[in-house]
Amino acid sequence: MTSEPRPRIYVLDTSVLVHDPTALFSFEEHHVCIPGAVLEELDSAKEGLSEVARNARQVSRFLDQLLAGRTPAQLSDGLPLGAGGPGQPTGRLFFEIEHHTHGDTAILAAARSLNTRQGEFAPVLVSKDINLRIRAQVSGIAAEDYESDRAIDDIDLLPTGVAEIPAQTWEQAQQQGECLRLPVPPGAAWRVNQCLFTERDNFEGIIRSIADGWALLAPLRDFRAAHSVWGIRGRNREQNFALNLLMDPEIDLVTLLGSAGTGKTLLTLAAGLSQTMDENRYREVIATRATVAIGEEIGYLPGTEEEKMTPWMGALMDNLEVLASPGGSSGDWGRAATADLLHSRVRIRSLSFMRGRTFLEKFVILDEAQNLTAKQMKTLITRAGPGTKVICLGNIGQIDTPYLTESTSGLTYVVDRLKDWPHSGHVTLQRGERSRLADYASEAL
């Protein structure tokens, strides 16, 4: 007769709790243990206005609610993590505070102690720290990454926003005014605002609605030859699709993925300036990004909020210089006047001061969004008021934030969660258009 498997008890590292404060309640019927060293690290991390400090304080509030009115005897039996209702965790919370060492060594000691003293449990260390997981496994302790916040299991399943129309489906197309009706192919994951194309008749369209197994396609504007946006033309099919989404007033959220040089920032800035300066659809362009350095920090930056953010927005400023170069023989004076005019309508803001704000009739650009967590993305996108459009740009293959991966990035989370909303659009840009050197280097290096 085989013995029943022991229920698991998950030992949580500080990196998990400051990454996701709700991790306490994410293990369903299994138990959770917090070592004393983690409580000390949470206490040290609680000061300040950073996301880590806010999360540390939130964990402390959760623990305070769970501990309210409990006696030491009750603590030894574990605290119920849920209220017993549907969807609530049924496991219990334990504390392991017998060890007087500090840091990772104490966390490993707590897991080892559980393994020897509580034979009814199978301890598993959960940490976002790869090296700590390696040390645990070398010591004979099971270790796992925290994956409850994973937006998608396989990053290859993330939609591209682009699909080719099968030949058999195209043959069944029916004209309906200026639009086409197409039967949705079996197994196809077509969505509203998805861009479709067929090489057969050089047709490119966008799905406006899907009902009763039929999709209604509207033809797209050609921004490669017939039209341009602030002097910018699309250089490939995906860029043309992106410009159509960026210029569509019925789409409130656009997400653009792509590697370096695919034109994400240039296309977005051109669309923002066109709709702000020419069409007066928006009052101004707001740009922000996560301030994550890829090298050594250079210290504090002087000046106002906008002046402090300017070095971080180098990519946007480079593209703004391109868009501020008028044609003709206007000379230096004309270029300077145009640049000053554009800078007056493009505002650079810091993420640190976004809480509580509401943007009315603004074109908001979230650059380098792959470095934001799901919670940060929610905080930023919910700042949008009436008449505001939000554009999220990023390359999920270039994440600089510790403990974030392609599958847990806030940008991946937004693309996956909002893919079926009829007022959102998404395109993954495939081809680099920066220069032949940049294109070759991105592949060869």
Image: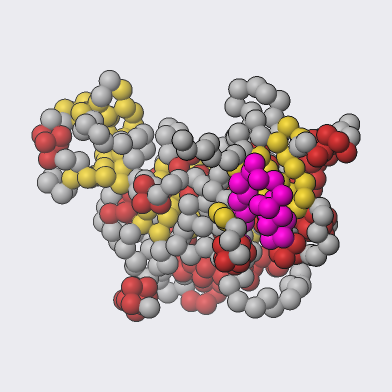
Residue 103 picture location, percent across and down: 75, 64
Residue 170 in the image: above or below residue 276: above
Quadrant where the C terminus is found in the figure: bottom left
The answer to if 373 sits in the magenta stretch is: no
Q: Is residue 260 left or right of residue 297?
A: left
Residue 176 against residue 356 in the figure, above or below: above
Residue 59 sits in which quadrant?
top right
Looking at the rendering, which quadrant does residue 282 occupy?
Answer: top right
Q: Nearer the viewer, residue 208 or 329?
A: 208
Instruction: Tell me the colour scheme of the image.
Output: secondary structure
116 inside magenta stretch: yes
Q: Position of residue 378 (x, y in %)?
A: 60, 43
Residue at 28 percent across and 54 percent down: it is 237
**Residue 23 visible to an observer of this rendering:** no
Point 80% across, 39% down: residue: 76
Instruction: Choose between 24 and 366: the one closer to the eye.
Output: 24
From the viewer's perspective, tell me whether residue 124 is left or right of residue 164.
right
**Where residue 82 appears, x then y in whole percent?**
69, 30
- Residue 7 percent coordinates (x, y): 59, 39
The front one of 175 and 113 is: 113
Residue visible at 31% across and 63% down? 431
Report the span colored magenta.
107-129
